[in-house]
Amino acid sequence: MNFRKQLTGGLSSLILSAVMSGSLLAAGVAEFNDKGELLLPKNYREWVMVGTQVTPNELNDGKAPFTEIRTVYVDPESYAHWKKTGEFRDGTVTVKELVSVGDRKGPGSGNGYFMGDYIGLEASVKDSQRFANEPGNWAFYIFYVPDTPLVAAAKNLPTAECAACHKENAKTDMVFTQFYPVLRAAKATGESGVVAPK
Amino acid sequence: MNFRKQLTGGLSSLILSAVMSGSLLAAGVAEFNDKGELLLPKNYREWVMVGTQVTPNELNDGKAPFTEIRTVYVDPESYAHWKKTGEFRDGTVTVKELVSVGDRKGPGSGNGYFMGDYIGLEASVKDSQRFANEPGNWAFYIFYVPDTPLVAAAKNLPTAECAACHKENAKTDMVFTQFYPVLRAAKATGESGVVAPK
């Protein structure tokens, strides 16, 4: 094999590896188009669910500031990194899925809030090179919310829209770990559930 | 190789294969001890979360019939089967984790219910041979609830305690799919999230 063939082969491997990692910058599952927009994450309901909250309209003067139920996921490899190190790695992706309140009474379980239909999808990505100027290197995205259409690719939102509140109020590296028991319990413990007594 | 060696080798393979499948009966992640008790599932917070509900005490005369927040998981292989076929395979395991209400107000997101601490763990297993006489072949287990200690292995609960209500009220094969949007959306669709427009 001559030098040129070796060089071409080496470059192809490098490009293939960059393409397969989904980003030319940080490792991770985030994929961007040539405009730098984040592509809609795939199969995120199979990621690790870290916390779910409900802020129903009826407890917020008929109009909750955010939609009523929200479920937050972290991609599995970044979760594994968090479980081992207690840190969000470069390339971490979180997805926040918005869900309407469905039933308000369960058979046997009483009055409350049960999940209805999907009504929105948001995401955030941590990338120290791509988002070098954002607080904590996190970017935030909306793919759809009620009354706006679903888009296949989303622009990074202005810092003031999401990042500012996350920076001010989220407990760990722009992430609201205070509301996510899965992350609190797993942090640098290597465990993803209660452990059986000996 | 003589006949005796062949027989021993064949039996070893059979036993090894049964041990590796985690059960001598249905395939799946459920593991049982020699008393037939279900062992505490491992890493279930990395399984597929199918739905979360909250029935707070204050909406139930100060004492909710079930603990306040509940998150339900399905093991990943059984979820993949559901996504493909719309059915719960033999060997399906679900875990229900009980969570206290923590904060009641979020920065920006308003009044509501946020996840606090883990306070209980329950599970169910579908196995047509092991539970041939149970409704839908499902067995139900409690590993701990508030005021009872965590156990490493749990007995199948009497049919009247869980199965009877599930049989009467759960929409699909003893499972409350009416409260689990992840399962409703994935049912025989091959999809685990919203799909980007073309």
Image: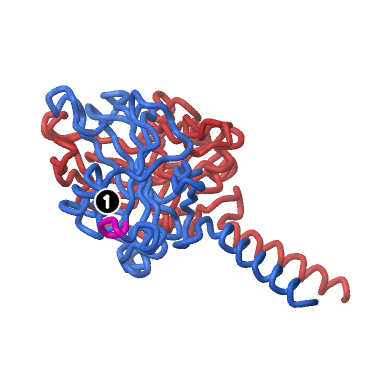
Chain colours: A red, B blue
Q: Is residue B163 above or below residue B193?
A: above
Q: Residue at x 80, y 68 (%)?
A: A7
Point 50% across, 46% down: residue: B33
Image height check: is A197 above or below B180? above
Task: Pick the residue in front: A51 or B178.
Answer: B178
Q: In the figure, is residue B34 to the left or right of B174?
A: right
Which image quarter: residue B78? bottom left
Question: Where residue B35 sits: x, y (%)?
Answer: 47, 46
| The magenta stretch spans residue B37 | no
| Residue at the farthest right position | A2
Is B147 above or below relative to B27? Answer: above
Q: Main secondary structure of the magenta part?
A: helix
Residue type beneath disc 1: Tyr
Q: Secondary structure at mark 1?
A: loop
Task: Say which of B84 and B103 sits in front.
Answer: B84
Chain letter of the residue beneath label 1 in the structure image: B
Q: Which span is picked out in magenta?
A: B133-137
For the point 46% across and 52% down, the residue is B30
Q: How many marks?
A: 1
